[in-house]
Image (tube, rainbow, N blue to C red):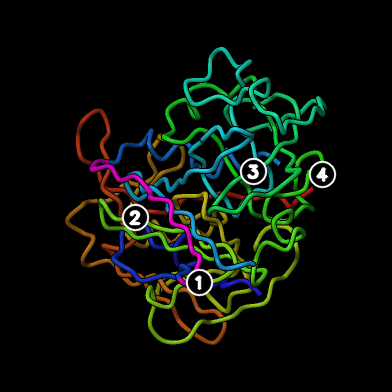
Amino acid sequence: RIPIIALLVLVLTVDAQIDILSSFGNGTIRVPLLSRNQRTISNLAPYHPYLKYNAQTPNPASVPLHDFMNAQYYGVISIGSPSQSFEVIFDTGSSNLWVPSIDCHDCNHAKYDHTKSTTYQKNGSEFAIRYGSGSLSGFVSTDVLTWGGLKVKDVQFAEATEEPGQTFQRGKFDGILGMAFRSISVDDLDPPFQRTMEQGLLPKNMFSFYLPSRSGSSGELVLGGYDQSHFTGDITWVPLTSETYWEVTVDSIGIEERKSAFKTVIIDTGTSLIAGPKTEIDQIANKMGAFASPLGGIYVISCGQAKSLPEFTIDMGGRKFTLSGPQYVMKVKVFGFPVCILGMIGLDIPAPR
């Protein structure tokens, strides 16, 4: 079982000072997350759900996460021998690992060079993921992955030779490490966490996230456990509806005056906004007095309204998880001017293929 609720609160809390799950104990290894002081609309773009959902002796180990304006959380992994380091988003909403290839001439990030790795194994199969802004393409390779101090052999990943435009070039991360299930993996590649489990490197087949919202704070991805120092009370466990995304049932979700009719949610650490069916989110935004912006389905609201907005509540697993207005309103920069937006977006997500 995975600490699902911890992940959910991390995704839905866009600007709250919260205590979430992480793992701490003997043998844990921590990797720091970076923090920045300002948000802009373009900073949110790499996590924009339109992009992703158009695509289709062991001790707990922890990976420190960097926080980029409470919108992007990324940590360090390494690939190859000797190791080549990359900052990646650990994404529970996808299943593939990809990093830029040395053959990508337009990639402005760290690049993997398989000619410098003694553990590289050639595969060469073509690889492509279609995003809303274009296609990410390249080829499949196999090598050693190191994350949280754990060395995982024979991990399949994509070397990206072409990235989809400015969206990824603006990101503070080099690549993405998907942590969802193999059933939604492009080209049916084994997800890295599955490989880690299969090689018996974990005390428990579990991972958890701690994503703090305070600027300058470090978060953690913990492999094989969780850190009780990051939360109080009991964990709420919720069963999965399918082994595709980390998808669970909810009893209700929304504001007091407008509860949504949908019954399942995806726990997605790689999306910086609350995403829901467009009709439902439109109605919630209208009820709050927000108006749709031409900037990709984002809802703008007066910054002065945040404290008077109704609570946003997720009712699941027999418990209610509540966000106040200031916790789901984000202040961003648009052409250098401060603007407040709702931390949610309307999106009709197709079923996994």
Which residue is the site of mark 2? 218
Which residue is the site of mark 4? 188
Q: Main secondary structure of the magenta part?
A: loop
Three-letter code for the amino acid on which mark 1 is drawn = Tyr
Q: Is residue 165 magenta?
A: no
> How many other residues sit within 10 Å of disc 1, few (<14), some (14-19) or many (≥20)?
many
Three-letter code for the amino acid on which mark 3 is drawn = Leu
Name the residue: 27% across, 57% down.
214
Name the residue: 67% across, 55% down.
193
Where is residue 320, by image quadrant? Answer: bottom left
Q: Is residue 312 above or below residue 266?
A: below
- The N terminus, quarter of image: bottom right
Three-letter code for the amino acid on which mark 2 is drawn = Ser
> How many other residues sit within 10 Å of disc 4, few (<14), some (14-19) or many (≥20)?
few
Where is residue 285, by image quadrant? Answer: bottom left
For marks 4 and 3, give the CA distance. Answer: 18 Å
Q: Please give the label number shown on residue 145.
A: 3
Q: Is residue 132 above or below residue 218?
A: above
> How many other residues sit within 10 Å of disc 2, few (<14), some (14-19) or many (≥20)?
many
Nearer to the camera, 96 or 157: 157
SS label for mark 2: loop
